[in-house]
C-alpha cells in the first residue's frame, strides 16, 4: 500500500524568534533535522519510489535538500498568508489588532488575516494538491503547520472547527497509509 508522509520543515530562524510567516532559513537545529531526515525516510521505505513535495519557501526546500528523491515545489503548499501580520509575534498582533486577535480566537477556521488568508481559504487552494495526492504513489510533503493541519484533517476526516488546533509538532514525520475507510497512522519523532 502506498503512504503519504508529511513533515513540517526543520526549525526556522522565525520559529526561534516566535515570528509568524516570512521566508527565513533553518536554524542550526533545523539543519540537524534536515541532515537526519534522509536516513529516517530511507529506512522506512526501502527502495520503493518516492517523490518529495515542498512549498516555494526556503525552509521547506532546505529541509528537503539532502533527500535522494525527485522533488517538486508547489506554490499551493506555501504557509497560510498572514497578510499585514506577516513577520509579527502573536503578542505584537494582539497589541496592534486586538479585535482581530479576539475574532481569530472566536472562529479560527474562518478568520481571515487582513490582506491574507483564513484556514478556509487554504483548504480551497489545497484542492488541486489533494486531487494530485489521491492519484500518486508514495509522497513525502515537507510543509508548514497550517498547511499540514488541512491535509491531515482531510485524510482523517476531521471537522473544520478542530482543524486549526491539530498538533503537528516540529521534527516529526507523520506517515498516513490510506485504507478502504480512513487511514492508518504512524509518527516518528527525531530527538533533536
Ligand atoms: O509559527 C509558525 C507558523 O507556521 C506561522 O507561519 C503560521 O502563521 C502559524 O504557524 C499557523 O499556526 P496558527 O494558525 O496556530 O497561528
Image (tube, rainbow, N blue to C red):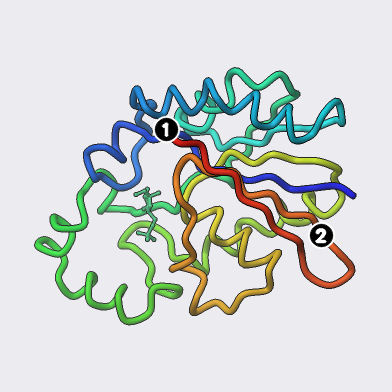
Identify the residue at horizontal 53%, vertical 43% (top origin).
Answer: 189
Spatial separation of the CA atoms under disc 1 and disc 2:
29 Å
Residue 123 in percent (x, y) is at 59, 64
Label 1: which residue?
A: 192
Q: Is residue 176 above or below residue 5?
A: below
Q: Is residue 129 left or right of residue 16?
A: right
Label 2: which residue?
A: 178
Q: Are marks 1 and 2 in contact (CB under 8 Å)?
A: no
Q: Nearer the viewer, residue 81 or 26?
A: 26
Q: Earlier in the sequence, mark 1 or mark 2?
A: 2
Identify the residue at horizontal 74%, vertical 23% (top origin).
Answer: 69
Q: Is residue 73 above or below residue 151?
A: above
Q: Nearer the viewer, residue 150 or 40?
A: 40
Displayed quadrant of residue 149: bottom right
Q: Nearer the viewer, residue 105 or 42?
A: 42
SS at mark 1 in the image: loop
Identify the residue at horizontal 39%, vertical 73% (top origin).
Answer: 108
Identify the residue at horizontal 63%, vertical 58% (top origin).
Answer: 151
Amino acid at each position: 500500500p502506498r503512504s503519504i508522509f508529511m513533515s513540517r520543515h526543520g526549525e526556522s530562524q522565525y520559529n526561534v524568534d516566535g515570528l509568524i510567516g516570512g521566508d527565513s532559513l533553518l536554524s542550526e537545529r533545523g539543519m540537524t533535522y534536515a541532515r537526519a531526515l534522509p536516513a529516517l525516510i530511507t529506512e522506512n521505505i526501502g527502495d520503493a519510489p518516492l517523490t518529495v513535495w515542498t512549498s516555494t519557501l526556503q525552509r521547506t526546500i532546505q529541509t528537503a535538500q539532502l533527500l535522494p528523491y525527485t522533488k517538486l515545489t508547489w506554490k499551493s503548499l506555501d504557509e497560510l498568508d498572514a497578510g499585514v501580520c506577516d513577520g509579527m509575534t502573536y503578542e505584537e498582533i494582539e497589541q496592534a489588532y486586538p479585535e482581530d486577535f479576539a475574532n481569530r480566537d472566536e472562529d479560527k477556521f474562518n478568520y481571515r488575516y487582513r490582506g491574507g488568508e483564513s484556514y478556509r481559504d487554504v483548504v480551497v487552494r489545497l484542492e488541486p494538491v489533494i486531487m494530485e495526492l489521491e492519484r500518486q504513489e508514495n509522497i513525502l510533503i515537507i510543509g508548514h503547520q497550517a498547511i499540514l493541519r488541512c491535509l491531515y484533517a482531510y485524510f482523517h476526516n476531521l471537522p473544520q472547527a478542530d482543524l486549526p488546533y491539530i498538533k503537528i509538532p516540529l521534527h516529526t514525520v507523520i506517515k498516513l497509509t490510506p485504507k478502504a475507510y480512513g487511514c492508518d497512522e504512524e509518527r516518528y519523532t527525531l530527538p533533536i
